[in-house]
Image: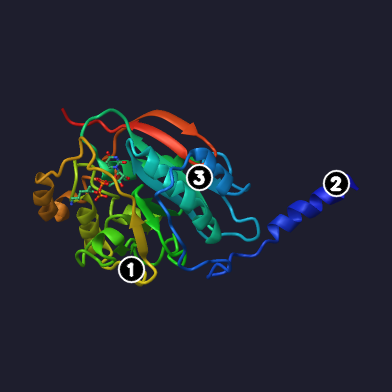
Amino acid sequence: ETSEVWVNKSAGEESLGVCPETPPNLLGPFQVELETVRTLEDVRKQVGPLLQVGGRYKPPDCISKQKVAVIIPFRNRHENLTHWLYYLHPFLQRQQLDYGVYVINQDGDGTFNRAKLMNIGYAEALKEDDYNCFLFSDVDLVPLDDRNLYRCFSNPRHLSVAVDKFDYKLPYEKIFGGVTALTKEQFLTVNGFSNTFWGWGGEDDDLYNRVMLRIKAISRPYAVIGRYKMIKHERDPHNDQNLNNVKKLKETTNTLDQDGLSSLNYTVIDITKNMLFTFITVDVHVPM
Ligand code: UDH
């Protein structure tokens, strides 16, 4: 009898259907309040019992077609991260996503390199599981409508189209920063991000150039759905605007093949998993 019960259980699991195209329990627009000081303990209470170590989740009642690695570039923004986790775990779960959250923490106080951290997140997540979709998100962007699906589409997707800081409008038509989603195949096709944009600016426009050169189209949600609050923060140290990056943007055609996933090198210093995320500290080899 015992074995029969066991067989039924696993058979039951295997007979789960594919998740519906439109998740059934979305809220649409929801309230986001970022004034309250929150702790990781508050977040743990909020996220529900189904989250697995390392910030992993699978919907209990259906099979997700995509496996999404959420990659967050990070250094010293712990308060932002707590808000992000507080809203995003329930959001991703309402969307019935099979996902993992990877926070890629740049070690030391050398010049920040957002794009290289994204490439590292891609590489490290793939060492853990067969992710087929990569959702890249700044730590300070909290979505305001859960119909904005954190999954991949037939073209590389720009999700953060209507941010409060920019008056809920695109600040310029080609913007491709903030939150983006690319399938594994799309990301490989563009050779990932450039690794050589040090300091603030340009790396997201370079990714846009890569996408336009190789894939020729992007997708976006409607602005009424792609709404965000940006968590207020001071300009970080060691991430000054780098005017050299503007010049580099003219060179994407020539640099795309040599500079990206194909040339990525870094050193993992530490990997720590807690209930809410996988925290990977890396030496990005800041040039002297
Ligand atoms: N980030 C960190 N730590 C840092 C720098 C950047 O975690 O020290 C990450 C974080 O995920 C952040 C993302 O990189 O959301 C983008 O960096 P950013 O916040 O500097 O870029 P953003 O455009 O803000 O959000 C710019 C600072 C405001 C000055 C506006 C001038 N145009």
Residue 229 position by quadrant: bottom left
**How busy is the neighbourhood of tag 1: few (under 14 within 10 Å), some, or many (20 plus)?**
some
Disc number for residue 219: 1
Q: Closer to us: mark 1 or mark 3?
A: 1
- Identify the residue at horizontal 47%, vertical 53% (top origin): 87
Q: Is residue 96 visible?
A: no
Residue position for label 3? 129
- Image coordinates for residue 194, horizontal then vertical, percent: 23, 47
- Image coordinates for residue 267, horizontal then vertical, percent: 33, 29
Residue 211 position by quadrant: bottom left
User: Separation of disc 2 and disc 3 at Cα?
Assistant: 30 Å
Amino acid type for the residue under numbered disc 2: Ser
Number of marks in the image? 3
Asked whether, in this view, residue 74 is left or right of residue 16, the answer is left
Residue position for label 2? 3
- Considering only order in the chain, which callout, 3 or 1, is on the residue closer to the N terminus? 3
- Identify the residue at horizontal 28%, vertical 45% (top origin): 233
- Identify the residue at horizontal 31%, vertical 65% (top origin): 162
Q: Secondary structure at mark 1?
A: loop
Q: Is residue 107 above or below residue 159?
A: above
- Considering only order in the chain, which callout, 3 or 2, is on the residue closer to the N terminus? 2
Q: Residue furthest front?
A: 36
User: Separation of disc 1 and disc 3 at Cα?
Assistant: 26 Å
Instruction: Assess whether mark 3 and mark 2 are in contact (beta carbons under 8 angstroms).
Output: no
User: Separation of disc 1 and disc 2 at Cα?
Assistant: 49 Å
Amino acid type for the residue under numbered disc 3: Asp
Asked whether, in this view, residue 233 is left or right of residue 181, the answer is left
- Image coordinates for residue 203, horizontal then vertical, percent: 21, 50
**How busy is the neighbourhood of tag 2: few (under 14 within 10 Å), some, or many (20 plus)?**
few
Disc number for residue 127: none
Q: Nearer the viewer, residue 277 or 152?
A: 277
Q: Secondary structure at mark 2?
A: helix
